[in-house]
Image: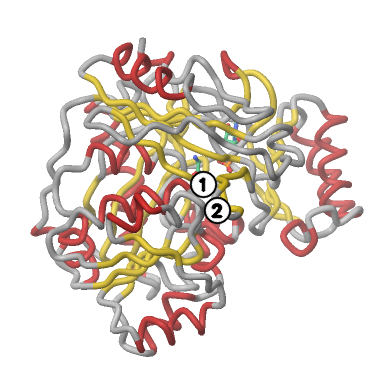
Amino acid sequence: MNILVVGSGGREHAMAWKLSQSPKVQKVFLAPGNGGTASAAAKNMGIENLPITDLHELAQFAEEQKIYMTVVGPETPLAGGIVDIFRAKNLRIFGPTQKAAQLESSKDFAKSFMKRHHIPTAEYQTFSDIKKAHAYIDLKGAPIVIKADGLAAGKGVVVAMSLEEAHGAIDMMLSDNKLGDAGARVVIEEFLVGEEASFIVMVDGHNVLALATSQDHKRLLDADLGPNTGGMGAYSPTPVVTPEIHARALREIIMPTVKGMAADGIPFTGFLYAGLMIDESGKAKTLEFNCRMGDPETQPIMSRLRSDFLVALDAAVDGKLNEVELEWDPRIALGVVMAAHNYPETPRKGDVISGIPADGSDHVTFHAGTSMDGDQLKTSGGRVLCVVGLDHTIRGAQQKAYAIVDQIKFDGAQYRRDIGYRAL
Ligand code: AMP
Ligand code: GLY
C-alpha cells in the first residue's frame, strides 16, 4: 500500500518514518517533504518527496496513484478543506473537515462552542470594533490575553501583563492590521495561571483514542525564557499529566468536545490537541484547540509507538477507534529541536549542515527546515532538526539526545540544553 503524508516538518517526517515501518506499507509520499526525506536513507525506507502543495493536485495524485491513506500534518491544508476535497473523491484521509477544523482556525468559533457546551475555558468576549475592545480592556484590567481570531502562524496570541501592552495588541491587530484578516476580529480573554500541558487524542467522529502524554517547551531559551516559538523540544511521557489529570481532561474536556461537535452536526475526525492550563486544585481549563498533532510532540510520540500506526489510522477512518489499543515503548523519548540562526524572528537559510549520524535503536533524527542543494544538506527554515533520544530515565534520554546534537554542526545553530527539566 502507498501512503501520502501532507506537510514538510519534523512532525510529518516522524509520521512517515513510523508508517514506513508498517509491513503493509510499500511507499510513503511526503508532500512536499524536506531535505531529510529526500535522502538516500529515506529512499531505502520507502520514503519519497512529492513536490506538490496544491490541495486539488494532491487529491488528483492520490486518485491516480491509488494512494490507500492520506494523513495531514499541519493546520493550513486542513483549514483549507483538504479533507472535504479528498472525501468528495472517495479517498481515505484522516483529519477534520474544513468546518470541524474551525476549532483551531477560528478562536471565536472555539470559544463560543466551548461556552455553548459548558467546556471549561477562560471567560472571554469577541470584538471587531476597536473602541469597544479598548473599553473592555479598561473594564477588565491586566493581565489579560488578546488572541487574533484566525490562524496567525503562532503570532496571534498576546499575553499582556500591562494595560499598555494590551491596548498595543488591540491596535496591532484591529488598526494596524499586522495580522491581516486573521486579526480582523479578536478574542479577549481572562488570564489563567497554572501548569500547562497538552493532551492529544485521535477522534473518529465519536470514539476517542488517547495518544501517549507529552509536553513541549515553547520558549526559545533555557528555563523557559525568551520569545515564544513553535516548540524547542518535547518529551513523552510526561509526569505533568498525572493519571488523575488524564482522566479529568478526557471526561471534562475531550469527550464533551467530541459529543458537542457531533451534536452540532460537525462530527470531529482527526487528531485533537487540547492545550490545557491546570490550576492548583488539579482542575483543567482549555487554552486552545489544535486540530492536528503537535510539532515537536509528534517526534517523541511516534518514536515510542510500537503498534502499527496504519492500523490506528484505518480504524479511525472507519469509525472503529474503540477497537484499537496502542502499545508504547516504555522508555522515555526526548526530542531536542535545533533551530536556525535568528529563529523565530527571521531565520537564516542556506547554512551547511554536517555530522548527522545514522539513526540507532536509541536515537533518531527527524528533519524539518532542511533541503538538499546538490549533494549538500542545508538549512531552509526556522526549526531545522529534531533529535530524539530514548532511554529508561529522563536523564538518560537527555544524554542520548544531546550526544547526537553535539555531533551535528551548522552555523548559528540554536537549541535548549534543558529539554525535559520539568520531569526531573
Ligand atoms: P494558544 O495559542 O491559545 O495556546 O496560546 C499560546 C500560549 O499563550 C499558551 O501556550 C499559553 O502559554 C498562553 N496563553 C494562552 N491563553 C492564555 C490564558 N487565557 N491565560 C494565560 N496564558 C495563556
Ligand atoms: N508544539 C505546539 C504545537 O504544535 O502547537
Left or right of 403 in this view: 349:
right
Q: Name the residue under label 2.
A: 111
* Among the 4 quarters of the image, the one containing residue 237: top left
**Residue at (81% x, 35% y) in the render:** 166
Q: Residue 241: x and y, percent?
A: 32, 27
Instruction: Give the quadrant of ligand 1.
Output: top right
**Quarter of the figure that contains the C terminus:** top left
| Residue that numbered label 1 is attached to | 368
The residue at 67%/29% (across/down) is 411
Mark nearer the viewer, 2 or 1: 1
At label 2, counting other C-alpha atoms closer than 10 Å, the crowd grade (few under 14, some 14-19, many 20 or more) is many
Residue 310 makes an appearance in the image: yes
**How far apart in space, not on screen, are marks 2 and 1 (Cα)?**
32 Å
Q: Is residue 248 left or right of residue 99?
A: left
Up/down of 392 relative to 251, above or below: above
Q: Where is residue 60 in the image (x, y as percent from the top left)?
A: 43, 87
At 57% from the left and 61% from the top, the residue drawn is 105
Count of marks, rendered view? 2
Residue 395 at what x, y percent from top left? 33, 11
Among the two numbered marks 2 and 1 on one chain, the one whose residue lies closer to the N terminus: 2
Q: Is residue 118 visible?
A: no
Q: What residue type is labelled 2?
A: Lys
Rendering quarter of residue 391: top left
Q: Where is residue 363 in the image (x, y as percent from the top left)?
A: 31, 30
Secondary structure of the residue carrying numbered label 1: loop
